Amino acid sequence: MKTTSFLLLILLLDFCSAQAAFENPGLSAKRLSLANSSVALTDEPSAFLANPGALGFFQHKGIQAGLARLYNLDELTQAEMAVAIPLGSLCLGGAWSSFGKQDYYQESQFNLACAYSLSNYLSLGINAKLMHVSFSSEYNSLSAYSVDIGSVWKANGKLQLGLAARNLNRSRLVKGSDDIPANFCLGLAVFPFKEVTLLADLSYEERYKEQLHLGQEIMLVENLPLRFGIETAPARYTLGVGFEFGKFVLDYAYVSHSVLGDTHKISFAYMWGKVAPEQSP
């Protein structure tokens, strides 16, 4: 089993969308079910992991946690926790995420973020990250620092644009090795009706193909959103559902993979505090 898991881990490192090698750590089940089309969304405590600028429009106090086993393997377990605290026009966030298994191969990431809303229409944010990789006790662990920046522009109540640049400093875990590539993403969120959200992200990394992420959320029943998504390079589709109970939110995501199989993820959030009336969903 360990040999099989290790071979799968190597495959994961070759697939940029598989969330290994610090690729999109900490994304919630909601964003995963929308095929990672999340750069223009601002409605979760963990939103700053996709775009630090999203934190500027988060008007709740909130905490969020998630858990997944990629391809149903313990060695590929993913877990995270995030918190967001708004302080007027300034909002602070923090997060921890982990991928892998202790004493085998494990990636850990610690985030400290802040964002400032310049107006009701524009916010800017930054996210500082400590990335840590540990192996079995026979090998030394590795660490590196990285920085993300981002912005969200609310054109009106029906349209939001997001722009994020992740791993800007292209840090290296080992001197002389390949760097952790920078990722640039442009996102669009459209709210044609109160019950419908349409999302589109275009992401680019220097060593990989461009990826297109498309997502849709439909609220057919009150407090029960259904979600669908599709992304390219490699082609994958996603499904999900949410359950909203006042201040509590429970989300589930299903993600397919053309080579490695399926993944299921669950996220839980608790949010409290008054939402500013001018904020869109």
Image: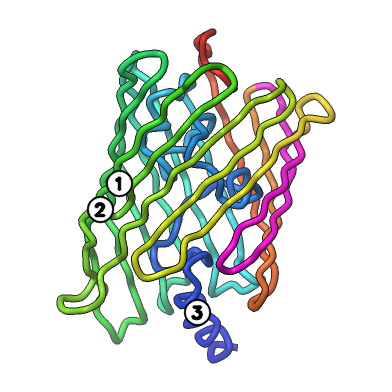
Please provide percent x and percent y for residue 40: 49, 35
Tell me which numbered mark, 3 or 2, is placed earlier along the sequence: 3
What secondary structure is marked by label 1? strand
- What's the residue at 24%, 54% (across, down)? 146
Q: Please name the residue that numbered disc 2 is placed on.
A: 168
Reply above or below: 8 against 244.
below
Q: Which residues are magenta?
A: 225-246
Q: Please name the residue that numbered disc 3 is placed on.
A: 9
Count all numbered tags in the image, as a single digit.
Answer: 3
Please provide percent x and percent y for residue 201: 52, 46
Q: Quadrant of the N terminus?
A: bottom right
Please provide percent x and percent y for residue 200: 57, 43
Q: Quadrant of residue 123?
A: top left
Q: Of the residues shown, which amino acid type is indicated by label 2?
A: Leu
- Cα–Cα gap, marks 3 and 2: 25 Å
Is 272 left or right of 174, judged from the image as shown? right
Disc assigned to residue 148: 1
Q: Of the residues shown, which amino acid type is indicated by label 3?
A: Leu
Reply above or below: 77 against 238.
below
Q: Nearer the viewer, mark 3 or mark 2?
A: 2
Q: Residue furthest bottom?
A: 3
Is 174 left or right of 97, judged from the image as shown? left
User: Badges 1 and 2: C-beta atoms under 8 Å apart?
Assistant: yes
